[in-house]
Image (tube, rainbow, N blue to C red):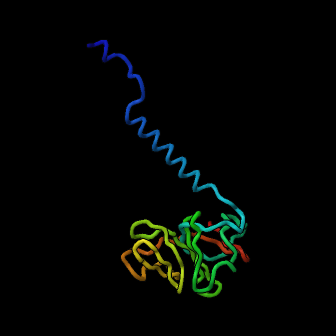
Amino acid sequence: MSSASSQPTAGPDRRTVVAAVGAAGLAAALTACGSGDDSADAGPADAGTAATGAAPDGGGTALARTADIPEGGGKIFKDRGVVVTQPTAGTYKAFSAECTHQGCAVGSVKDGTIVCPCHGSEFSVSDGSVRKGPATKGLAPARITVSGDDIRLA
């Protein structure tokens, strides 16, 4: 029996396999989040928060042109996980496009409200706060910069 216990195992142990699979999944997720189109014509994005200001160097990932965001409404950028709004003329905000109730992606922006299609939660385009549940927490803010006519995810 002593000879069997002194032999090395034939393959990696379970903990090593689980860690490797987790690391591979994390790497794939980070790669997907980091890849992006820097053109102003980039499609919808998910996730965001509010910030208005000029980027001194134009840095960040291009999301849209200011003319693409309707006053009193907004636009969802599913590929970025962000929703950008224009609550009042010339004021731009951004929020995470992930509903705080159960993680569904918000589906529309209309009449000053960001709407989640899964359970009907509604959020304010001004500050991401809950207007109607079942969500109890507002949408997380995302950082954007506005420089001229360009809106960028910071």
In this figure, what is the number of numbered marks? 0
Q: Quadrant of the N terminus?
A: top left
Q: 42 or 54: which is nearer to us?
A: 42
Q: Is residue 96 shown left or right of residue 70? A: left
Q: Give the position of the C terminus as an image quadrant.
A: bottom right
Residue 85 placement: quadrant? bottom right
Left or right placement of residue 5 versus residue 74 in this view: left
Vertical relation: 36 (above or below) 123 = above
Q: Where is residue 65 in the image (x, y as percent from the top left)?
A: 70, 75
Residue at figure coordinates x 59%, y 67% from the top left = 45
Front in this rendered view, residue 116 or 153? 116
Judge from the rendering whether residue 10 lies leftward or rightward of residue 147; answer left or right: left
Residue at the limit of the structure toward the left, as seen here: 1
Which residue is painted at 37% across and 34% down in the image?
A: 14
Residue at image location 56% in from the left, 72% down from the top: 83
Q: From the top left corner, tell me how far across and down residue 100 is, in percent.
A: 42, 70
Q: Residue 19: which quarter of the image? A: top left
Residue at the (49%, 43%) spot, across then down: 23
Quadrant housing residue 92:
bottom right
Residue 98, how many percent across, how many down? 48, 68
